[in-house]
Amino acid sequence: MSDLCDILSALRWHVDIGCDEAVADAPMDWSTFAGRPQPASRQPAAPRAPAAPTARTQSTFGAQPAATPDLPLGASEAGTAARARAGEAKTLAELEEALRAFDGCPLKRTATNTVFADGNPQARIMLIGEAPGEDEDRQGKPFVGVSGKLLDRMLGWIGLDRTTAYITNILPWRPPGNRSPTQAEIAACLPFLERHVALVAPDVLVPLGGTSAKTLLNRAEGITRLRGQWFDYAAPGTGKTVPVLPMLHPAYLLRNPISKREAWRDLLTLRQRIGHTG
Ligand code: URA
């Protein structure tokens, strides 16, 4: 009985710290992650031999670094590779294909699906969330879980839906346990988002929540300071500037329903800008 209690309390502890899903059969030591994750082992590590030249260390000046399943890219190489691949995409379909083929972000390994976008790419409004959650990871679409249901209701308040809005995220892969994305993960994926915005060319961008707003606007302030104000986004590679209206994230509103009045105000600001039909 006491063994069972120990197991249950260990399980509860794991859930409390965010381990809500088993992503592999064997545990991995991510603190020593440097390539393909190895099952954690209790054996002392063998002394390391000097690194043999690899595809990465041998890369010649000007050549694009290439990730292999055994050797994922470092943060700045990942950003460079992402920029090159995303930049080649001339259509959204090509961009999605390039993103699915991109191995420079380790989150891809633990995610079930690449979550690209949902809604109408011809829409005037492009909403940008943070990253897929559990439901989005399973279904491969952004904002399909509880916060997505609230987002749909919020859009409905101003006469919009997924036929008149387009939705994506800063990151296309779910961070394990829904933890916050790291700067390295964001940097690796940002070129894809920038190309995504350039190809959709929306009239208005709406970052949802602090991570999205700070990333897009390159600002340090939190979302409670940024929300409800208009900013300009100089869309890379387009020479165009897109108006940006940061708003509170629906998941935040679910935890803080009192803040719905601010969200309502921001939605009215948005509607004023785009008119009633979107
Ligand atoms: N939260 C987000 O930021 N994006 C999603 O797609 C789902 C939840």
Image (tube, rainbow, N blue to C red):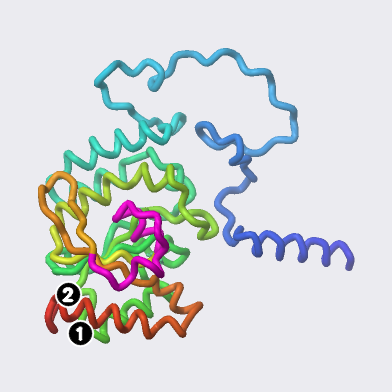
Q: Which residues are magenta?
A: 210-230
In the image, is 110 to the left or to the right of 103? right
Residue 107 % position (x, y): 45, 47
Instruction: Identify residue for label 2.
Output: 164
Toward the viewer: 99 or 62? 62
Magenta stretch holds residue 227: yes
Count residues near mark 1 (Cα–Cα under 10 Å), then give few for <14, some for 14-19, many for 20+: some
Crowding around mark 2 (Cα neighbors within 10 Å: few <14, some 14 to 19, many 20+) is: some
Describe the element under mark 2 as helix, strand or loop.
loop
Residue 220 appears in the figure: yes
Indicate the secondary structure of the residue bearing disc 1: loop
**Spot occupied by residue 6 in the image (x, y as percentages of width and height):** 82, 62
Magenta span includes 121: no
Q: CA distance from mark 1 to mark 2?
A: 9 Å
Q: Is residue 222 left or right of residue 239?
A: right
Residue 268, compared with residue 126, is above or below; it is below
Residue in the picture at 50% in, 77% down: 255
Instruction: Tell me which image quadrant ligand 1 sits in.
Output: bottom left
Marks 1,2: beta carbons within 8 A: yes
User: Residue 264's spot in the image, x, y percent?
Assistant: 32, 84
The residue beneath circle 1 is 159
Residue at (41% x, 32% y) in the render: 73
